[in-house]
Image (cartoon, rainbow, N blue to C red):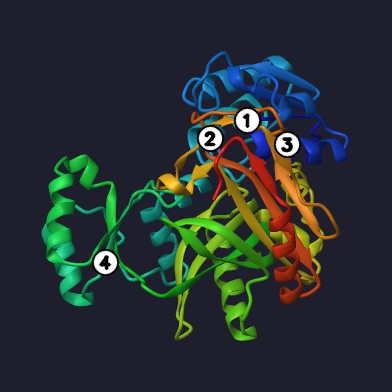
Amino acid sequence: MRTINRILVANRGEIALRVIRTAKDMGISTVAVYADQDMTAPHTREADLALALDGDDAASTYLSADKLLQIAVESGADAIHPGYGFLSENPAFARAIENTGIAWIGPAPGVIEALGDKISARRVAQACGVAPVPGLSEPVTARAEVEGFIAEHGYPVVLKRADGGGGRGITVVRSSTDLDLFFARHTDPADLGAHFVERFVEVARHVETQSARDSLGNFHVISTRDCSVQRRNQKVVEEAPAPFISQDLHSRLEHFSRALFDAVNYVGVGTCEFLVEADGRVNFLEVNPRLQVEHTVSEEVTGLDLVEQQIRIAAGKRLAEVPSPRAHSFEFRITCEDPASGMIPSTGTVSRLRWPLGHGVRIESGINEGDVVTSDFDPMLAKLIVTAPTREAAIARSRRALAELEIKGVATP
């Protein structure tokens, strides 16, 4: 057991605000950090203390482990919450924090190492009896290896970067011509060796479990989620609980998730992701050792605050009892991308901002009217979360809320 009195939030925007608000609810002091252009951002105003990172790009600010650690020590923070993105899955950063005696609000560095690399995660899954998508759990070293896999499984296959995430580093290969192109683009052995091969699952649902485990070994699947609505392999709409899931499938997902967490002694909140095919086959994809963008829908259907649970677990406390899902919730990601120009990032001043209101509507945002949106960071502006007693009612409420939403000055889908 340890006491957490002051948390440095090593992130920005709606992510940082999300953590700061929960910390305030718990009576915990917060420290915000900011890049030059974020000096007057909402997260800096809401924190008890806001300190400059002295830079205007990600590398020199929110990705600078040295700066963040120095500020944490100098500000008297006794814990660091990384949010999601940036350094949230960086084991070296987590280890450096723990070496100072500051609490890392997340799984242990060794757990991040075991699960953060997709090849390593496949090996963990296989070792605990959770079948990954058919593939080779070794780095690609030569074309013959890929051709041998294709000879056995056929086209299409997918070549993935072991360190990829957020839909990046994925190449779908449907023919020998595609394979020629891939190897023509990856002639450097180190670059090639960062990839592995899997069967490409054409039609499947992307289902995940929001899971948590405390230092006493207590484990819960807080809720399932369906994240099948994607664009360019990136999630756009998520819902909880995952609909049309049989009790047998739910039990298997829960069993697999517990096995994965137990295998690496995972202590914290995380997400297990699976592809569920039409015949009911469940394929392991990955474990995300952090909070995820879509955690909000799991909160809405259970009433649990997952950031609070992260803080409790980091302090050595017992995971709260998890109620059964009591409603249905959708999350819509609002991004500054221009649909008229191939979804390239849109920049400008937010000249008009009208959020939807009403029962069952939640907004997670780090922008205000008049703010300037740049292309320096992730294009996600906000999240709209809509909850109702049933899925049908949640869909109807979502249509109403989306119709009320108005953002001018930057293009949004």
Quick one: SS at disc 1?
A: loop
Question: Which residue lies at the image location 78% right of the left edge and 47% below the top edge?
Answer: 308
Which label sits in the foreground, 4 or 1? Answer: 4
Which of labels 4 and 2 is toward the front? Answer: 4
**In the displayed structure image, the side of residue 286 where residue 74 appears, left or right:** right
Label 4 and label 3: CA atoms lie apart by: 40 Å
The reply to whether discs 1 and 3 touch (Cβ–Cβ < 8 Å) is no
Label 3: few (<14), some (14–19) or many (≥20) C-alpha neighbours in 10 Å: many
Viewer-side residue, 373 vs 257: 373
Which quadrant of the figure contains the N terminus? top right
Q: Are marks 3 and 2 in contact (CB under 8 Å)?
A: no
Q: How far separated are the C-alphas under marks 4 and 2? A: 30 Å
* Amino acid at circle 4: Val
Q: What kind of residue is marked 3?
A: Leu
* Cα–Cα span, label 4 and label 1: 37 Å
Q: Is residue 134 visible?
A: yes
Helix, strand or loop at disc 3? Answer: helix
Judge the density around disc 2: few (<14), some (14-19), many (≥20) Cα neighbours within 10 Å: some
Q: CA distance from mark 1 to mark 3?
A: 11 Å
Disc 1 residue type?
Answer: Ala
Image location of residue 76, percent across then percent down: 74, 19
The dot on residue 157 is: 4
* Element under disc 4: strand
Give the residue number, with chain letter if any, for mark 1. Answer: 10
Q: Are marks 2 and 1 in contact (CB under 8 Å)?
A: yes
- Residue displayed at 86% across by 59% down: 359
Which disc number belongs to residue 279? none
